[in-house]
Amino acid sequence: MRQFIVVGHDAPTTAEFSLDDLPGAGRLDLLTRCVTSSLLLSHGIREDVRTHLVLSDAFTVSFDGSAVQRLNPDERSTAALVRNALDQREEAVGRMAVEPSPGVSLTRVGLDGTLDAVADDGPVCLLHEDGTSAAELDPPADPVFVLSDHRDFGEAELSVLDEHADRRVTLGPERLHADQAITVAHNWLDTEGFSDYSQ
Amino acid sequence: MRQFIVVGHDAPTTAEFSLDDLPGAGRLDLLTRCVTSSLLLSHGIREDVRTHLVLSDAFTVSFDGSAVQRLNPDERSTAALVRNALDQREEAVGRMAVEPSPGVSLTRVGLDGTLDAVADDGPVCLLHEDGTSAAELDPPADPVFVLSDHRDFGEAELSVLDEHADRRVTLGPERLHADQAITVAHNWLDTEGFSDYSQ
């Protein structure tokens, strides 16, 4: 399994936002693209992926590729799934998840709680410009990638992350958007050995 | 320079579409993501990129990274730039471009005319599942990548493309969305030699 944790620093924590202005809703445009870039292929879904959006360190919305339904590639419809999840925020108590739609769950945990929840799943790789080049590494099995939104991680976050993360990895010399980094990370794992058997 | 030509088979050719339903507007959600994934970095723009959206083989909207302004990462605002361009379609006569906003131009040409216009710019690489693995190739200088939207290229298109294209390249074993393929293609070019000088 591959997992992605995306930290949304300014993300909404209530359903009171407009689908007509996703950048204004704490950069929900970026966060929804992270969901679709991690879970969707052309005409297919990556069933072995789970993606967690950490919303302002207060709630986490998780998408499970093996169960999610009605996930379309566009930002607006994915944002509607997030809004539906937040609409049930009162029912989310601690780590007890609510599942407002198939494969979409909401928990009242922030980054620390989300990292705890995946602690036994596989190595945690922080995608960060100050990391080891992916070109020098073999892709890990069952990785949990952690990324930030448009804002850099703060000192306190990096301290929490360095406790959990097995390593920092950088995917190239350019600073990518989080959704672009997810696409490149997938390709890194997809193409392991690919050239050996392709034409 | 890097260029991307994205063929939108069902894309609108008039400004009469709603920004609230981009998937219903001939998959303009996908086409706008192709624009932003090709031109935008995190907090930056790729000035050496031009991206051409071929709209239903009738019009082409081109974005020039060295001149474009007010390009935001979200689908909706990028779709508004496309709509503004189509709003001036009557003024686009043949290859005479209109430039409704800085760095965004509209021409009344389809795929063939767009390929003719870039013929001297660099090698044309068709991104296609039946191609040579990128892992086996050195990235070309000044490439013109051609991609299709959610629909496969038709026989007639492939015939036109094979006349112009220097080769077919495939980026991995998974079938990616066009915007994801653009991100991976950029990373292929970005990381050429990257591991040699990174940490």
Image (spheres, coloured by chain):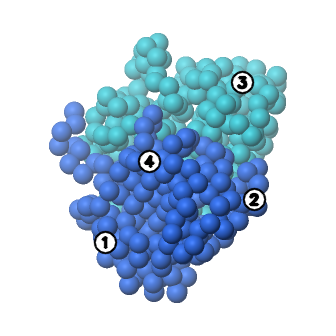
Chain colours: A blue, B cyan
Residue visible at 71% across and 45% down? B76
Whether residue A22 sits left or right of residue A137 in the image: it is: right
Q: Which mark is residue B13?
A: 3
Residue visible at 76% across and 20% down? B93
Q: Distance between the residues labelled 1 and 3?
A: 52 Å
Q: How far apart are marks 4 and 3 (CA)?
A: 37 Å
In this view, the residue in front, A37 or A122, is A122
Q: Mark 1 points at which residue?
A: A120
Q: How crowded is mark 1: few (under 14 residues within 10 Å), some or many (20 or more)?
A: few
Q: Which mark is residue A17?
A: 2
Query: In x, y percent, where is residue B154?
Result: 46, 17
Residue visible at 69% across and 51% down? B71
**Labelled pair 2, 4 in contact (Cβ < 8 Å):** no
In the image, residue A17 above or below residue A90: above
The answer to whether tags 1 and 3 share a subunit is: no
Q: Mark 4 points at which residue?
A: A67
- Tell me the amino acid under the disc marked 1: Asp
Query: Which badge, 2 or 4, comes first in the chain's sequence?
Result: 2
- Identify the element where label 3 is drawn: loop
- Tell me the amino acid under the disc marked 4: Ala
